[in-house]
Image (spheres, helix red, strand yellow):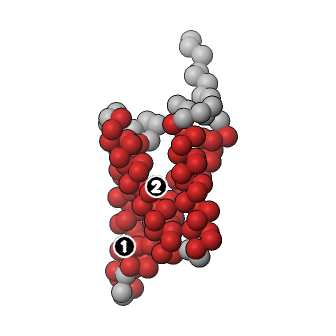
Amino acid sequence: MTEPQQMDITPNDVVAFLVEIAAVVVLAAWGWSLGTSAGTRVLLAVVIPAVAIALWACFAAPRAVFRVPAAAVAVKVLVLGGAALASFAVLPVGWAVVFAVVVVVNTLLTWFGPFAR
């Protein structure tokens, strides 16, 4: 029998997961804010984060379907950067700045430094 693999999860990985969840929530809120009727609000609040989740699962997730490093970076920039920008439309400016800074710092720590993968 083989020993189960142990994953090295760092504190930055936990923050990254929370940032990803927050990004989906912000994108849903932004989609809601774009709608002009109840139907379009619901549609946009579901479709925009669903597209982000699908792209993330295909290219940027740890167990992504397609292992294309350039696509992973592009999807991360698109989803996380889009969520950071969208936060300025749906959150008070101070909270939007905090969210954007956390996204940038967390992403940089994922690629560079002691928590790099």
Q: From the top left corner, tell me how far across and down residue 36 is, in percent.
A: 36, 87
**Callout count:** 2
Q: Secondary structure at mark 1?
A: helix
Q: From the top left corner, tell me how far across and down residue 18 is, in percent.
A: 59, 52
Label 2 Cα neighbours within 10 Å, binned few <14 / some 14-19 / many ≥20: many
Would you identify the image quadrant in which residue 48 lies? bottom left
Q: Nearer the viewer, residue 59 or 89?
A: 89
Of circles 1 and 2, which is in front?
2
Would you identify the image quadrant in which residue 72 lies? top left
Q: Nearer the viewer, residue 91 or 64?
A: 91
Give the vertical position of 79 relative to 112 (above or below).
Answer: below
Find disc 2 in the rendering and name its residue: 80
Residue furthest top as drawn: 1
Q: From the top left corner, tell me how far across and down residue 49 is, in percent.
A: 41, 62
| Observer able to see residue 29 | no
- What residue lies at 35% left-to-right and 58% top-to-bottom? 51
Give the vertical position of 71 relative to 88 (above or below).
Answer: above
Q: From the top left corner, tell me how far across and down residue 44 is, in percent.
A: 36, 73
Q: Is residue 71 left or right of residue 94?
A: left
Q: Nearer the viewer, residue 113 or 3?
A: 113
Find disc 1 in the rendering and name its residue: 44
Q: Secondary structure at mark 2?
A: helix
Q: CA distance from mark 1 to mark 2?
A: 18 Å
Indicate the amino acid at tag 1: Leu
